[in-house]
């Protein structure tokens, strides 16, 4: 546990309190093609990872807020890969928050379903040779999904968020969030990014 200093921001008070191993590092405006968001930075001393959060509007008014918890996917989010639907989901989530005028997107640094970028590339090599997503991870010695969501709770608490209207297709993500005390008021599907290159991937993920 570490003391977290909530530095100056329009939605965050100047106070010191103990929250997990997470430090709030500050915020700035970030213009996008959809809206001008607030970009918040968090540092987790336990994992050494840095996470970012986009917010728009008053997310601390007690009303269930439109939200997305998105795990890093460098190939899909930044390199336009069509092997997955991650980049399309990220863009669609940001667009929907902008259209609503209020919402939050947590961007977690847990690449490749938690196995890391290099192992993700190795898993892709195995998929090129005929393995599906789960089989490739298992051949590398990993479970099918190593993502963790405990860090979301102190992030939501720091930013004053209560219940969520969560944009996700994954019921396991909802269960994981609810187990740590986060209220998911509603699930909102993100049905986008389907293409011939990721048809088998999406089928495996659904199963």
Image: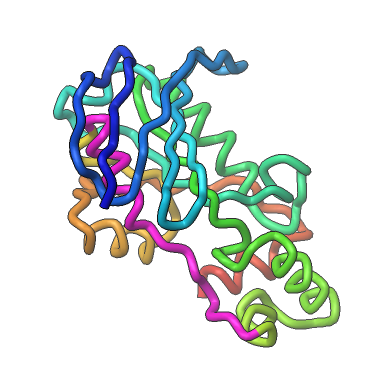
Q: How many marks?
A: 0
Which residue is at 28% across, 37% downward? 4
Residue 101 sits in quarter: top left
Q: Is residue 32 left or right of residue 46?
A: right
Residue 139 sits in quarter: bottom right
Which residue is at 18% across, 36% downward? 17
**Depicted 149 relative to depicted 24: above or below:** below
**Depicted 1 relative to depicted 53: above or below:** below
Q: Is residue 104 left or right of residue 92?
A: left
Q: Nearer the viewer, residue 155 or 124?
A: 155
Q: Is residue 153 magenta?
A: yes
Which residue is at 77% across, 50% downward? 81
Q: Is residue 102 left or right of residue 98?
A: left
Q: Is residue 117 magenta?
A: no
- Range of magenta residues: 141-160
Q: Nearer the viewer, residue 90 or 191?
A: 90
Q: Is residue 115 left or right of residue 61?
A: right
Give x and y (percent) for residue 94. Answer: 51, 30
What colour scheme has been applied to the protein in the rendered image?
rainbow
**Depicted 83 relative to depicted 205: above or below:** above
Give x and y (percent) for residue 121. Answer: 77, 65
For the stretch drawn in magenta, the main secondary structure is loop
Farthest residue, direction left: 62
Give x and y (percent) for residue 197. Answer: 78, 60
Which residue is at 32% across, 40% downward? 155
Give x and y (percent) for residue 78. Answer: 72, 40
């Amino acid at each position: 546990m570490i003391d977290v200093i909530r530095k100056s921001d329009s939605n965050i008070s100047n106070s010191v309190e103990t929250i997990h191993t997470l430090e709030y590092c500050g915020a700035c405006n970030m213009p996008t093609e959809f809206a001008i968001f607030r970009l918040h930075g968090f540092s987790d001393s336990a994992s050494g990872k840095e996470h970012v959060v986009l917010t728009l509007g008053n997310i601390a008014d007690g009303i269930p807020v439109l939200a997305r918890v998105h795990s890093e996917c460098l190939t899909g989010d930044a390199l336009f890969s069509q092997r997955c639907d991650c980049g399309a989901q990220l863009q669609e989530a940001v667009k929907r928050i902008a259209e609503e005028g209020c919402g939050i997107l947590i961007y977690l640094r847990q690449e490749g379903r938690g196995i890391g970028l290099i192992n993700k590339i190795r898993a892709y090599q195995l998929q090129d040779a005929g393995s599906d997503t789960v089989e490739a991870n298992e051949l590398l010695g990993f479970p099918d999904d190593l993502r963790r969501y405990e860090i979301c709770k102190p992030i939501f608490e720091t930013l004053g968020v209560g219940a969520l209207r969560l944009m996700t297709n994954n019921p396991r993500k909802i269960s994981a969030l609810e187990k740590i005390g986060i209220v998911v008021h509603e699930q909102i599907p993100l049905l986008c990014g389907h293409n011939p290159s990721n048809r088998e991937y999406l089928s495996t993920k659904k199963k």
